[in-house]
Amino acid sequence: MAEQPLIVVIDDSEIILERIKTRLEAEQYRVVTTAQIVGAARLLRGANLVILDWHMPGMTGGDVLASLRAACEKSQKRPLFYLYTSDPTVAAAAKNTGFDGSFINKGDDDSLAQQVGAAIRIAKLKARGSGTRPPRSGRP
Amino acid sequence: MSLASRLALWIFALVAGVSLVVAFQLTGREHDHYVASKERAGRMLTELFAASIAPALDFADQDALTASLGMLSQNPEVVDAAIWSALGDKPLAELHPNPKRSARGRDPGVELGSDHIDIAVLAKTPTGKALGSAWVRVSLAQENAAFAAVRRRIFWLAFVLSALIAGLLVAMLRRTIISPLAALERAAQRLARGGVVELGELRRDEVGRLGHAFNHMARVIREREERIVAVNGRLQGLLDHMRQAIVVFDGEGHLATERSRFAHELFGDAFGSHTDICDLLYPVGRSPEVEREAFRTWLAEAGSIAPDGFDELSELAPREVKIRPENGEERLFELEFRAVASEDRKPRVMLLATDVTSQRRLERTAEASEREHQKQLTAMRRLLAGGGQVFVRFLASARERLDSAVRELSERPFLSTEILENVFRFVHTLRAEARSFDLGTVERIALALELELAGARPAPEQSPVRASVRSKISSGCGELGRELATAEALFVESSPIGRRVLEQVTVSREDVAALVRRYGGQSDELGALVARLAARPFGELLSALPDSVERWAVKEGKRVELIVNGRETLVPAELSERLGAALSHLLRNAVAHGIEPPQYRREHGKREAGRIEVTCRQGAAGVVISVSDDGAGFDEDALREKSGTFELGGHNVVELAFAAGVSTRERPDDMAGHGVGLGAVRAELGKAHYLVSIGSERGKGVTALIEPEPAKTGAIHG
């Protein structure tokens, strides 16, 4: 059976993490969550998508992204990094700060599920275009 | 340049060229003729002149020679003349002295110039002895002038003639070829624009045959278009009758004109402003950018993929999209993408968008209904297990804390950290409590509030973030209040004793029994209080019966709807001890004997599901309970036969049902047919001083009525 995409979610709120995990697991994704920046890089191995909060304690999502990217370059496959925010201004600037994209409407779990599906599809389509085999999965 | 102009030019050039060539040929000959005549005349003149000067030459008479030249010069055609002796190289006499005159001129002969003729003739004696020679130059000026005039006339004639011929030919060509071709061209253009064309007045020549061929072609095209329009109409009809929004777009996302009526209804004016499928499905600014990007990426791939790879690619297309039509509510569409044949081999994709809003809503409603059902069962179980009081306490406590939170929020002008933390604790606790009572909506609202509050923690107290959260918290508290009220209403609804459950307290039955034993017989206020305390809500007595009725109906292969009225009516203790068994018996009888099988009911114009209505009301003398069904009623003939009393009639016949050993059931089973039921019910209720009577109408149903004996006064006044 094909392996489902692995999604890592990093947010300082356990409540948000719990919600996201429940919703995305309902979409058959494998979901790993953490509220700790320290050691988060270890979770990225094999991940297809990383969802980051912008407002982290003591640092911005951009700082977290930079440290994760640095850690990730040593690994074989780099996941997609998406910013999750309810602030349209921050979302619009996400690509300029190094993110692959952004998920908006933070708090709307259905919308998040749709957007995550779209990001996973982008990854698969780009993998097709580059000639590498896309990660197989059922839903979405 | 038009064909007519080109033809005119060519014809004119051709005719003019030919005319000029012919004219030049003719004028050349004329010119030769003039020169030859002039040469003959000049020769004659020169010979006469030579003969006239012979004597003077013989005698070397210079004066005579000069005189002869003078006479010759009278002739206007003579432009020069000279005379040589046979022996000298220099002329003896000249008309116009010329030191460079050549001696070669004395040689006899004719020499032609462009504007003159030189003629030299020998002057001889009569014996033929050459004495010298005479040379005369005759002018050709007149001949040349005449020739030039003739040539000009011929040139103009040729020009005019050529123009006339060209004009005539062009007029003829215009009439026979150019005009019909122009008409054909106009007709072809009208045909191209979709017009109906038919060329008329066609001649029997090549152009006419071309016109006939064109008319035939136009007819064939028209017929083919009519067939295409008909086929398209049928296809469009099919599209329009599909409950799907269907649009077609090319590999670059440009929308084609093919679209279903539902697509028009859905997108409406958006079709006018959007020519791109991506903008249509994911309007800029209204859709998450990542979804637009995913679709754009997919679209780029779809635009270049071979048809046999499309199915695999379509797995990566979006499955669903939410669309908000102009001035309409958001709707959910299931998307299906299919590759369609294209005339120009460019990839084209058909999108079938199925509106699943109602379906999903129905599914959600069904799920919600199922959840509610489960909740009711849970509530029932909780209630039966004595948990009702806990839930009631939860509701009261939650309301109290909610009111306190709302008060705090309204009393302070800003969301202080203290209030924020208080509200957070309350919401957090409420979420956990709501979860333990399966109150999903309350839990979700509480969670949303928690998120908001958690997000507002780092913000300064009087910041806009806090102000925004304060407003959201107030709104959320309002929602919580409504949801708690809904939960309470649901709980009351699912409780067999209704609203009284909110006032219920746990009391030992033994204590109540002791009170009844000691004070129940008293007719004073204490006796009434004890009687009320011992009384039980009618719904509580029936709590197990709905499930039983359903089970019996399934066993009998029937469908039954049970309606209970007056669940909160208090039933006196004495009756309540016996009423459960009596009602159970009456209901079982109604299912087994009264309600007909669904097919029978359907054939006799009744609803497939039989209806049994149980009502408890407070009468003047005590509670009155009726159990009525809309079934077959008693079979009076069968009752008479079973009881062996054929002489009875009317109401008395139904009374036979209370007789021991009488049952209309052919074969006894665990449901009925033993003939001991109704009599036992009457006897049992009689012990509590209640009567049971039955009314029946064949084909309409049975009503059993339980009411106090006339002397009994057992009203419980709450």
Image (cartoon, coloured by chain):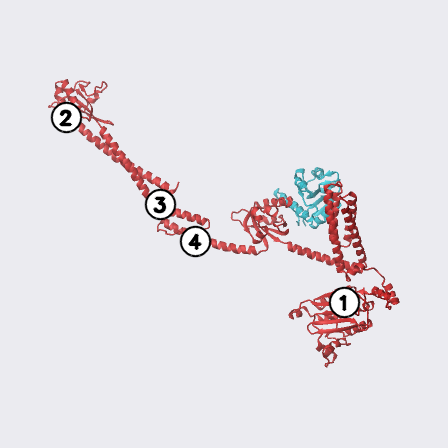
For the residues labelled 4 and 1, the Cα–Cα distance comes to: 85 Å
Is B395 or B285 nearer to us in this picture?
B395
For the residues labelled 2 and 4, the Cα–Cα distance comes to: 92 Å
Q: Amino acid at mark 2?
A: Leu
Tell me the chain of label 2: B
Specify the colour of chain B: red
Circle nearer the viewer, 2 or 1 = 1
The disc, 2 or 4, on the residue closer to the chain's N-terminal end is: 2
Q: Amino acid at mark 1?
A: Cys
Question: Image height check: is A11 above or below B433?
Answer: above
Q: Which mark, by number, is residue B616? A: 1
The disc, 2 or 1, on the residue closer to the chain's N-terminal end is: 2
Disc 4 target residue: B219
Q: Position of residue B701 (x, y in %)?
A: 70, 71
Left or right, residue B258 beside residue B399:
left
Q: Tell me which corner region of the image, top left, top right, bottom left or bottom right, holds residue B630.
A: bottom right
For the N terminus of chain B, the quadrant is top left
Tell me the chain of label 1: B
Circle nearer the viewer, 3 or 1 = 1
Left or right, residue B161 beside residue A103:
left
Q: In terms of secondary structure, where does tag 3 sit? A: helix
Q: Which mark, by number, is residue B174? A: 3
Q: Position of residue B84 (x, y in %)?
A: 17, 20
Disc 2 target residue: B48
The disc, 3 or 1, on the residue closer to the chain's N-terminal end is: 3
Q: Position of residue A62 (x, y in %)?
A: 70, 38
